[in-house]
Amino acid sequence: MHSENPEIEIEETSEKIKIPLKALKLLAKILKATSQGQPISLVPIATEMTTQAAAELLGCSRPHVVKLLEEGNIPFTLVGRHRRVKFEDVMNYKK
């Protein structure tokens, strides 16, 4: 029977930590992708982003993102005069 949280020893310090199997599998995917030269970006889900960052994530122009926001396709908030969108909302739209 294998543990859901495998124990890993850190080579440099001999410290042992338990890591959830899901996290270990994610780390393996990240290491595989980076070893193949694929860029990796880690973004906390609740992070708010600018319309420019959203445009880059969607692969379109910033004015197009603004149009999507104004049409109600992606929720946004205003910080002063600047629109901010949640990463999660952009990804939901992308799907």
Image (cartoon, helix red, strand yellow):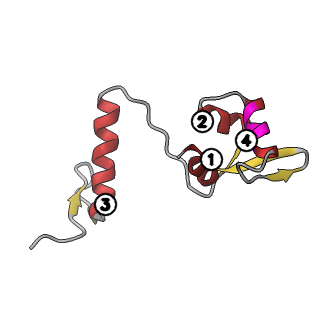
Q: Which amino acid type corresponds to the residue marked 4 in the rendered image? A: Thr
Q: Is residue 62 left or right of residue 9?
A: right
Q: Which residue does the numbered mark 3 point to in the structure image?
A: 22
Among numbered discs 1 and 2, the one appearing first in the sequence:
2
Q: Residue at x 49, y 39 (%)?
A: 41
Q: Which residue does the numbered mark 4 point to in the structure image?
A: 50
Q: Which residue does the numbered mark 1 point to in the structure image?
A: 90
Question: Disc 3 versus disc 4: distance between alpha carbons?
Answer: 30 Å
SS for tag 2? helix
Among numbered discs 1 and 4, the one appearing first in the sequence:
4
SS for tag 3? helix
Are the residues at dot 1 and dot 2 in contact (C-beta closer than 8 Å)? yes
Which stretch is magenta?
Answer: 64-68
Q: Which amino acid type corresponds to the residue marked 1 in the rendered image? A: Val
Q: Which amino acid type corresponds to the residue marked 3 in the rendered image? A: Lys
The N terminus appears in which quarter of the rendering? bottom left
Q: Which mark is residue 58?
A: 2
Q: Position of residue 86 (x, y in %)?
A: 67, 52
Among numbered discs 4 and 2, the one appearing first in the sequence:
4
Residue 36 quadrant: top left
